[in-house]
């Protein structure tokens, strides 16, 4: 859990999400992101992931798992507001 230096707003930041090369053909990376996304929903906090231009595979996994587009080199997943859950 982190916050910008100039604000009190809190968010979840993925600081280290590493899957060893031998296990990258499995769903381990997307499973880790699915857990982070669920945790974000439980805490009702945005989830921030970072990926650089030198990590295209990581960018694709994050984009696919979080269903969001990058903002620079960051991906921000915002959980549904409590009032909107189940709303038509």
Image (spheres, rainbow, N blue to C red):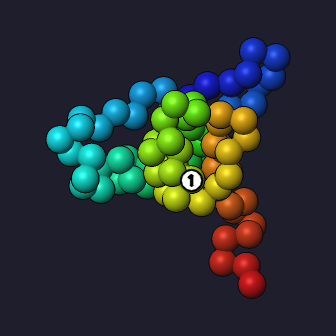
- Give the position of the N terminus as an image quadrant: top right
Name the residue carrying label 1.
Answer: 63
- Count every numbered label the image shows and give the total: 1
Q: Is residue 14 above or below residue 85?
A: above
- Give the position of the C terminus as an image quadrant: bottom right
Q: Residue at x 72, y 35 (%)?
A: 72
Query: In the visual, does 41 lie left or right of 33?
Result: right
Q: 28 or 38: which is nearer to us? A: 28
Q: Is residue 49 visible?
A: yes
Q: Residue at x 24, y 55 (%)?
A: 26
Q: 31 or 55: which is nearer to us? A: 55
Residue 14: x and y, percent?
Answer: 50, 33
Q: 75 or 78: which is nearer to us? A: 75
Using a 10 Å C-alpha cutoff, classify the residue at mark 1 as few (fewer than 14 neighbours), some (14 to 19) or many (20 or more).
some
Residue 8: x and y, percent?
Answer: 77, 24
SS class, disc 1: helix
Query: In the visual, does 41 lie left or right of 70?
Result: left
Residue 40: x and y, percent?
Answer: 55, 48
Q: Residue at x 61, y 38 (%)?
A: 48
Outermost residue on the top side: it is 5
Residue 49: x and y, percent?
Answer: 56, 37
Q: Residue at x 64, y 42 (%)?
A: 75
Q: Is residue 5 above or below residue 58?
A: above
């Amino acid at each position: 859990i982190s916050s910008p230096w100039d604000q009190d707003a809190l968010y979840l930041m993925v600081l280290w999400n590493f899957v060893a090369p031998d296990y990258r053909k499995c769903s381990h990376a997307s499973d880790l992101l699915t857990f982070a996304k669920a945790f974000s929903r439980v805490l009702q906090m945005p989830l921030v992931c970072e990926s650089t231009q030198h990590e295209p595979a990581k960018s694709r996994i994050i984009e696919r798992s979080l269903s969001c587009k990058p903002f620079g080199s960051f991906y921000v997943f915002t959980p549904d507001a409590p009032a909107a859950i189940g709303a038509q």
